[in-house]
Image: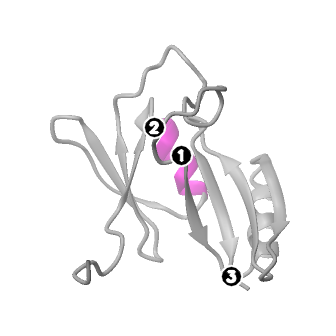
């Protein structure tokens, strides 16, 4: 479909706005508004233009990420991938923030490099530097 020009936002279901906001502020996201709407939703945006909508209705009875942490593989979005211009610098920042790198860094055959972390609700975030 040629009319698509980009991604408007990423929706992430979270348990608690305050803890989600605190985590993503460490990554440079800025709180915009919320909670608003019937779900409800809160919005944060990074200076790079990446926009996240937090859907504030996650089940608080489990810490598992049903798409990533159980043996049954359900359909759904498994992670977001954020482009970075310096993977080593991004890794240094993540380590200084005492956020655990859950996988990587991994070098791809084309020379791209990526690593993964989890947010406060075990949602997966990939940091990716193109070759």
Q: Residue at x 35, y 34 (%)?
A: 56
Coloring scheme used: one colour
- Magenta region: which residues? 19-26
| Label 2 residue SS | helix
Whether residue 22 appears in magenta in the rendering, the answer is yes
Residue 104, compared with residue 100, is above or below; it is: below
- Residue 78 locus on image (x, y percent): 54, 47
Q: How many residues crowd around disc 2 within 10 Å: few (fewer than 14), some, or many (20 or more)? A: few
Q: Whole-Å distance between the Cαs marked 2 and 3? A: 32 Å
- Residue 95 locus on image (x, y percent): 81, 56
Question: Residue 58 vs residue 100: left or right?
Answer: left
Q: Residue 18: give its label.
A: 2
Q: Are marks 2 and 1 in contact (CB under 8 Å)?
A: yes
The residue labelled by disc 3 is 130
Q: Whole-Å distance between the Cαs marked 3 and 1? A: 28 Å
Q: How many residues crowd around disc 1 within 10 Å: few (fewer than 14), some, or many (20 or more)? A: some
The residue labelled by disc 1 is 22
Q: Earlier in the sequence, mark 2 or mark 3?
A: 2
Residue 73, compared with residue 36, is above or below; it is: above
Q: Earlier in the sequence, mark 3 or mark 1?
A: 1
- Residue 55 locus on image (x, y percent): 34, 40
| Label 1 residue SS | helix
Q: Quadrant of the N terminus?
A: bottom left
Residue 47, compared with residue 58, is above or below; it is: below
> Mainly helix, strand or loop, the magenta region?
helix
Disc 3 or disc 1, which is closer to the eye?
3
């Amino acid at each position: 479909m040629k009319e698509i020009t980009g991604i408007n936002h990423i929706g992430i279901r979270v348990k608690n706005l305050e803890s989600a906001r605190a985590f993503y502020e460490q990554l440079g996201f800025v709180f915009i508004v919320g909670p608003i709407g019937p779900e409800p939703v809160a919005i944060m945006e990074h200076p790079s233009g990446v926009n996240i909508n937090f859907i504030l209705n996650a089940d608080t009875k489990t810490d598992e990420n049903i798409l990533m942490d159980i043996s049954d593989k359900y359909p759904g979005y498994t992670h977001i991938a954020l482009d970075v211009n310096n993977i080593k610098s991004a890794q240094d920042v993540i380590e200084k923030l005492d956020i655990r790198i859950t996988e990587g860094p991994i070098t791809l055959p084309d020379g791209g490099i990526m690593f993964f972390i989890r947010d406060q609700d075990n949602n997966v975030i990939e940091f990716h530097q193109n070759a």
